[in-house]
Image (cartoon, coloured by chain):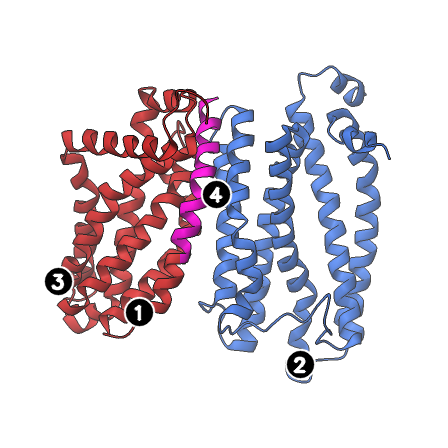
Chain colours: A blue, B red
Amino acid sequence: MTWTWFHRLGSPPYIYRLAGRLTPWFGWIAAVLLLGALFDGLVLAPPDYQQGDGFRIIYVHVPTAWLSLMIYTWMAVAAAVGLIWRIKVAHAAAAACAPIGASFTAVALVTGMLFGKPMWGAYWVWDPRLTSELLLLFLYLGYMGLRASFDDLQRADRASAVLAIVGIVNVPIVHFSVIWWNSLHQGSSLSLTGKDTIATPMLIPLLLSMLGFTLYFLAVVLVRLRGEVLRRERAASWIGEVVAP
Amino acid sequence: MPEGLTPPLTAARLVITRDLTLAFRRPEQLLHPLAFFVMVTTLFPLSVSPELSQLRAIAPGVLWVAALLAALLALEFLFRDDAQDGTLEQYALSGQSLTWLLLGKTGAHWLLTGVPLSLMAPLMGYTLGVPAAASAGIMVTVALGSLALSFIGSIGAALTLGVRRGGVLLSILILPLAVPILIFGSRATELAIRGEAYVAPMELLGAIVVLSFTLAPLAAAAAVRISLE
């Protein structure tokens, strides 16, 4: 088995072209999946016997909350790869992840608040899940703040990578907070190993929506990655070939 | 171990001795976090209510937030002087393990800020209507919490070396990571004030201390090397 395909991922011109080719695929499949998931979830799925129609916000809330953690993990892994093997593209990928992850965290918080008002009677409660998700948002903002405060790109990359790796301790805390502490937030409905605690007609649109949001994230992160690569490589000669009209 | 190197523990001890000696030559600097802590604490009787029963109820939170802010304020100066006069560079070039040297440096920082804060905390608690019997509990929890904060904060201090307006950034980076310390610390203090057993949150606080003590110097050493590049 050769690793050339993997090594080529570290090359800015290659990743720039690859990202450009992949973006429409991810984007269009995401659009189809999301439209289907929303129609299935908002129209076809039956109302919940306890939560009525209010539960339908999970088709946005669960995927964004799940992605907020997932993106942080990917960001930290990309940062670690960049720090250890000194791969510039990995740093660019981590930088591209941060604003998207922060947006997903904010959307998860806002939809959670809208969900909380009819279910718990309050937009915000100081609950472990909510608090740790808020801290995740602060971590994203701190990461972006640290990155923005250096003029030297290399130092910004490496310093923010250390922060991303240190901050990953928060990810299991958010994920397990519902189990560890007595939380108002309901437990997870999805499980890879055990039985899902959600009815199949409600589950299918949820899975579609999670897949759709993940592909949407991939499409957006590739666009951002191309931007990062262009900005970082603006002095390189290959830029002229791809950008020239 | 290569020839001519001091054993890591001895090197860490030498760093502690050096930092303590330097600090005691300018003792007025040691008073700044303490004065800040006292002033923040006195703001609460003035802003909330001078009623002791009310103050007693919020005392754990007030003491911990004030101690956390005071410790954060001090963290900004953890590496600053040594980075400016080149000492940190010499540490990195010395061939000694930078991790151990920073362990010593952060330990010295805790002795100079965390320990005085933990001694002052029961006193300020007393002014908030906390019974004197809770003094030992408050002292131990604040001492442990500030130790963990010093180590976690050393990462942030190393990352923000040479950054304009680094102090604010340092707080933004460190506060989300310091929240568990605040939660368990103020919980232990609350139980101590009520005269109940506070061992359970103390043990969690101890676990955070062990985790930060063992892992944070590694990250701080990496961060210092990055900022020296």
Range of residues picked out in magenta: B207-229
Q: Can you tell which quarter of the image residue B166 is in?
A: top left
Q: Earlier in the sequence, mark 4 or mark 2?
A: 2
Percent across and percent down for residue B1 are 46, 27
Percent across and percent down for residue B121 are 19, 56
Q: Secondary structure at mark 4?
A: helix
Q: Secondary structure at mark 1?
A: loop
Disc count in the image? 4
Percent across and percent down for residue A87 are 66, 29
The residue that disc 1 covers is: B198
Q: Is residue A157 above or below residue B181?
A: above
Q: Earlier in the sequence, mark 1 or mark 3?
A: 3
Residue ID at (72%, 38%):
A223
Q: Spatial distance from mark 1 to mark 4, Cα to Cα?
A: 33 Å
Amino acid on which the number 1 mark rests in the picture: Tyr
The residue nearer to you, when weighing B7 against A50, is B7
Q: Main secondary structure of the magenta part?
A: helix
Amino acid on which the number 4 mark rests in the picture: Gly
Q: Work out whether residue A218 can be spotted.
A: yes
